[in-house]
Amino acid sequence: MDFQLNEEQLQLKKSVREFAQREIAPNVRKWDDAGEFPLATIKELGKLGLMGVVFPPELGGAGMGYVEYVTAIEELSRVDGSVGIIVAAHSSLCSNHIFLAGNEAQKKQYLPKLATGEFIGAWGLTEPSSGSDAGSARMTAVRKGKTWVLNGTKTFITNGHYADVVVVIAVSDRSAHTHGLSAFVVEKGTKGFRPGKKEDKLGLRASDTAELIFEDCVLPAENLLGTEGQGFVDSMRVLDGGRISIAALSLGMAEGAYEAALNYSKQRKQFGRAISDFQAIQWKLADMATEIEAAKLLTFRAAAMKDAGLKTTLESSMAKLFASEVAVKVANEGVQIHGGYGFIKDYPAEKFYRDVLEICDHRMDTAVCEIFQQLRSDVLALEHYGEQTAVLEDVCLFPVVVEKAEEGVSQLSLEDWFLDVDLLVYRLRHRTPARMWSTTTFAALLDVFLEFRFLDGVADIQSSEKCIENAFVESEGSWWVADFNQRKGAED
Ligand SMILES: Cc1cc2nc3c(=O)[nH]c(=O)nc-3n(C[C@H](O)[C@H](O)[C@H](O)COP(=O)(O)OP(=O)(O)OC[C@H]3O[C@@H](n4cnc5c(N)ncnc54)[C@H](O)[C@@H]3O)c2cc1C
């Protein structure tokens, strides 16, 4: 276990820090006051490779990993959270969706421009009436011959006014619920598409948060991103990576708020001494530093696991939850340590406090839900299969499926069931290679799905089986699929 950044990572940290001090720090107050988007700075970040840290060089990226990505977001956000969120939404939402779900032509068309900052990207899932419940989106995508026609409004979209390319999620088949959502790539200037209201925000004011309006926006069929009907499932995959971004953003802002408070406490004199000499202030600073360190460990652990190809849903959710709460606590204490000056714009404390409020709160309940679901899955796995399934956590939704099998499908809505199958398939695809799983895991999984075939109420179990077969084939488990088919034949 190595808790140190290596030489290259330290060098990256140093150069991002120097860039942020030189190019961002002198402008932070001006951008914040005016709500000014730092376009020239973002273009510079593109030239430095920081707009496509994790993408491969052949697609214009820097070819680095999530540890480096987190380091960059941390250092940028330490100076200005607005720059952090601009880069994070561009990279981990827009570019990453194209990277994960796009075909080769789409990747080649968009990623080199996004990764170098020539294009700025935005990602639109949220709508006025669908926030946390993103599956209830209303924006429509209607297929007309060789085109798609988009109608509807997205809201709160980061980089909305400045985006050259936007990924949006729309309903292509309402009857299929969350399996009827599809993703599309839309370029700036496409007829029928325009950014709408720019939000006037409490914090992160230099980042652009906008409405996106689609009115009979006609797209060629090839602008469909990924498989039709898979837009929601792909979005959940995208958000899985996005949690690490939010953790890094939170970590950076917490560090910035802490450093501002520490410096102020050394300079501010009361009762003839620097206030940092008072034990009450020292305790505050010690708590802040300790909690930041804990947030850093969680965040970098999630990033290192992602780089190692491991599942990080639990770890990245924990990192996001903890780091964002630490950011709010630290920023609050920073304001207190500044006394009355913490409330005044001449000092950075009040801005850090306003900025961190955006990342905490409204998205935290869903992070808690995700953590709970993950923990519950692991507990159930152990209860059902005991020690034989030490690697069952590889298939994190499996125990939920087992439990549902036992409850009887009739108690479930078909929509829930299919969502779980899709998430399961996604996790199978992105898990460690199949050869690392135990045969017990495979066999138990097989039994569950064979059992499902004989339960009433599942209309489309055959296609679910097909999905699982495909997932195993893709995840190098082809040897196992033969067994699956053999056993299926025996049951028939
Ligand atoms: C600055 C900023 C940038 C953003 N950037 C983007 C972007 O680039 N792209 C994009 O698509 N979206 C973006 N968003 C939208 C963001 O993802 C949503 O705000 C978020 O999903 C929450 O949705 P909502 O605001 O509609 O709140 P709601 O979903 O209406 O939630 C209101 C409250 O209810 C709670 N709540 C909701 N459901 C549950 C539940 N099941 N259990 C318990 N509590 C619950 C929430 O936690 C919250 O406290 C951005 C938002 C902001 C403020």
Image (tube, helix red, strand yellow):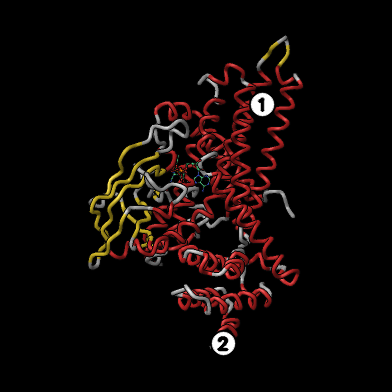
Nearer to us in this view, 227 or 461: 461
Q: Secondary structure at mark 2?
A: helix
318 and 115: which is toward the camera: 318
Residue appearing at x 29%, y 46% in the figure = 213
The percent position of residue 459, horizontal first and vertical second, equals 44, 74
> With respect to residue 441, does 78 lie above or below?
above
Q: Residue at x 61, y 38 (%)?
A: 325
- Label 1, secondary structure: give it: helix
Q: Quadrant of the N terminus?
A: bottom right
> Along the line of sight, which residue is nearer the eye, 435 or 465?
465
Picture disc at residue 491: 2
Amino acid type for the residue under numbered disc 2 = Glu
- Give x and y (percent) for residue 484: 57, 83
* Residue 460 found in image quarter: bottom left
**Nearest to the observer: residue 172 or residue 43:** 172
Q: Residue at x 72, y 9 (%)?
A: 271
Q: Is mark 2 within 8 Å of ligand 1?
A: no
In the image, taking residue 304 as reference, residue 229 lies left or right, namely left
* Quadrant housing residue 396: bottom right
Residue 262 marker: 1
Q: Give the residue type that dot 1 points to.
A: Leu
